[in-house]
Image: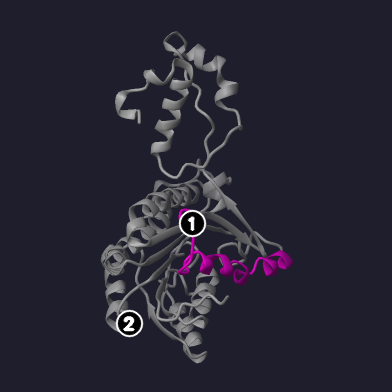
Amino acid sequence: MTISFKDRVAIVTGAGGGLGREYALELARRGAKVVVNDLGGARDGTGTSDAAAQVVEEIEKAGGEAMSNGASVTEYDQMEKMVADAKQKWGGVHVLINNAGILRDKSFAKMSPEDFELVVKVHLLGSAYATKACWETFREQAYGRILMTSSSTGLFGNFGQANYGAAKLGLAGLTKTLHLEGAKYNIRCNSLSPVAGTRMTEDLFPEEAFKLFSPENVAPAALYLVSEDAPTNQIVGAGAGGFHSAWVTMNDAVWLKDGERTVEGFAARWDDINSMTNLIAPQSGSEQSGAILKAMQDVLGADAAPSSARG
């Protein structure tokens, strides 16, 4: 089976280098017309360059179609224009890979509010702005594929990256709601947590590891997650040829009776409340309420549940 993007228009943000460049090149190889978006800034977001134009040149030399775009993901009106330009040239937009990002790493004690805000704005708000600019088009054409770039820092934490982690876990949460709101319009949304040797991580890897964690080893997961037959509401990790899934899970609720609902009562049941048994991966937030009602019914019987919660 060959996965094709023929007759699809794809936007990749932050595509002037690293992962975004690899995604753009592979999409073009598989027939997509690609908007290569990149402001061209340094790792900390400063400066500009013609990085996007260079990737477009690579695609065109290989016989593909692409256009460069230097808009900032932090400016919603620029994202709207980017989508409008793609639609004017190619008639639609079908795929969006939100890849643009910057780093301003410091311990939380030393991090300025400005550095916290800018990283969150680029990663989280930038992805939301680009997605919002595409959203109505996706709904109208009853087709859209969206990939958010999350991170192990967001999912699991990492010293010195409070701003980055907050944004990246926020993107996983955004994915979960967009998956629900887009379902009836055939809009699928997933999150990718990549580990790759790029300019964002070049000082973190030894040389040999840097080569092993090449962006081309992440691209298979990224492109599958925006393909026609992609799943939705998934969190996938990828790096160096290794791939895994991750989930936001919860265990069975423990229901405390009236006389037990004290700080001491909670403390007494903490081991049960914190037990990693019977884990599930809810598909919507309403399942938390359902789990609590089930725990109450298990203790008091089915008639104890509010009438609105009973079938």
Q: Which residue is mark 2?
A: 90
Q: Earlier in the sequence, mark 2 or mark 1?
A: 2
Report the quarter where the C terminus lies. Answer: top left
Tell me how the rendering is colored.
Answer: one colour
The foreground one among 190 and 99 is 190
Q: Which residues are magenta?
A: 207-233
Residue 104 is marked as none
Residue 191 is marked as 1
Report the quarter where the N terminus lies. Answer: bottom right
Which SS class for mark 1?
strand
Percent across and percent down for residue 223 are 52, 69
- Identify which residue is drawn at 56% across, 14% down: 268
- Identify which residue is drawn at 49% across, 91% down: 63
Percent across and percent down for residue 122 are 40, 58
Three-letter code for the amino acid on which mark 2 is drawn: Trp
Which SS class for mark 2?
helix
Percent across and percent down for residue 218 are 59, 66
The foreground one among 133 and 260 is 260
Tally of numbered tags? 2
